[in-house]
Image: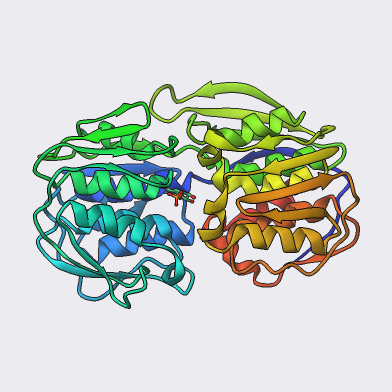
Amino acid sequence: MKFSPVSSLRGSLTIPGDKSISHRSVMFGSLAQGTTEITHFLKGADCLSTISCFRSMGVEIQEKDGKILVHGRGLRGLKRPEGVLDCGNSGTTTRLLAGILCGQDFDSVLTGDASIQKRPMKRVIDPLSRMGANIVSVRGDGCAPLAITGSPLHGVSYSTPVASAQVKSAILLAGLYADGETRVTEPARSRDHTERMLSAFGADVRTEGTTAVIQPARELYGQKIQVPGDISSAAFFLAAGLITPDSEILLKHVGTNPTRDGVLRVLRQMGGRIETISQSGGDGEPAEDLLVRSSDLHGVEIGGEIIPTLIDELPVIAAVACFAQGETVIRDAAELKVKESNRIDAMVRNLAAMGADVTETEDGMIIRGGRPLHGAVIDSRDDHRIAMTFAVTALAAQGETDIPGWDCVRISYPEFERDLAGIIA
Ligand code: S3P
């Protein structure tokens, strides 16, 4: 796929549904009694992997009038899957399912694509094992495939070394099946969709600072869920609007949960003109209409507690930093190395290929902005967020940018090209 510079971006967009919330709606809906009706579900490949895993455990999931209907089987109603559960490229599917499967009364095996089979799973194996789970890495390398033998679970109090919503959620989901209270403490607060949504489904879950606490559940109850637009997908258009001249883009109904909105805080701090036009959603999952305009940007320091709230947006923030005057320092972001690809390495090398002044550090990177960028051939590493980051960067660079392996964008944003084409003035 090739991208060229544009002189202006104008128009409005409805961003596809949030990936994290879409996964959880299918998972919790499957474990609930009754039907869960999901509006604006993200039909990206990752969420389709979650649907296919639950279908193979006997859950009936239909699409009707643009909505997804999950006919829940209750907390103890899943069936033993016929074969291996294939989580595709999805870390969320793999880790959250691991938490769910440990407390079932059947055995299962979880795996995924080449990238998933390299991602660290010890971070869920360790705490789940402490709860009494029987879960092993089949090859013994701490990665998937994971073999799980369902067993009785105990409540634990666990401090995670990394702020990770996938780890926290795996433990909380296992906690639904435990014999007592389960507590998870994080070094900084990660996204809290599991806590908010499980509470709506009827679980007894609460938050105390950076600790999430859950009680064992007897039943969950099906819900109607309106999935907000994914702020991680909106981030590409926020970036595009800021760095492309003469641009004004309205992004409608973007999820702005405070554990996810770090990208807005940082881009505004950089001088980005991003205006909140309206707000909705209340306490459930808040959402906003956002108006973004071309802006004069300056560098910032990004580190500490804000990192988990913008972890998936750091690649595109790094790209924006190339168009900002002065230095941007990203630190405390070593987690980027264990995402769908090593995103520090992928960003540093590809930005350098476009002429940026960027240095890799232990836990992030330093970008000295203001140099004009030129088109290049991008090594996307089959990572959807890297591919889309460079599509956006190309809009404000000189000459053509080629992104082989573009197909990976189907993971989180199958309609990206169509949406981009719709705002090129
Ligand atoms: C996610 C949590 C984050 C994020 C991922 C989705 C989730 O991962 O990067 O894209 O849905 O819980 P970690 O838990 O590994 O930080």
Where residue 297 appears, as percent x and y from the top left, is 81, 34
Above or below, comparing residue 324 to residue 129 in the picture? above
Where residue 392 appears, as percent x and y from the top left, is 74, 52
Residue 305 in the figure: left or right of residue 47: right
Query: Please, which colouring scheme is shown?
Result: rainbow
Q: Is residue 213 visible?
A: yes
Where residue 349 appears, as percent x and y from the top left, is 74, 63
Between residues 21 and 205, which one lies in front from this camera angle?
Answer: 205
Q: Quadrant of the C terminus?
A: top right
Between residues 237 and 142, which one lies in front from this camera angle?
Answer: 142
Residue lying at the far front of the rendered structure: 362
Above or below, comparing residue 367 to residue 339 in the picture? above
Q: Is residue 61 visible?
A: no
Q: Quadrant of the N terminus?
A: bottom right
Residue 400 in the figure: left or right of residue 33: right
Residue 90 in the figure: left or right of residue 85: right
- Count of numbered marks: 0
Residue at (13%, 39%) from the top-left corner? 217
Where residue 311 appears, as percent x and y from the top left, is 55, 45
Residue 403 in the figure: left or right of residue 323: left
Residue at (36%, 26%) from the top-left corner? 209
Residue at (23%, 44%) from the top-left corner? 35
Q: Quadrant of residue 52?
A: bottom left
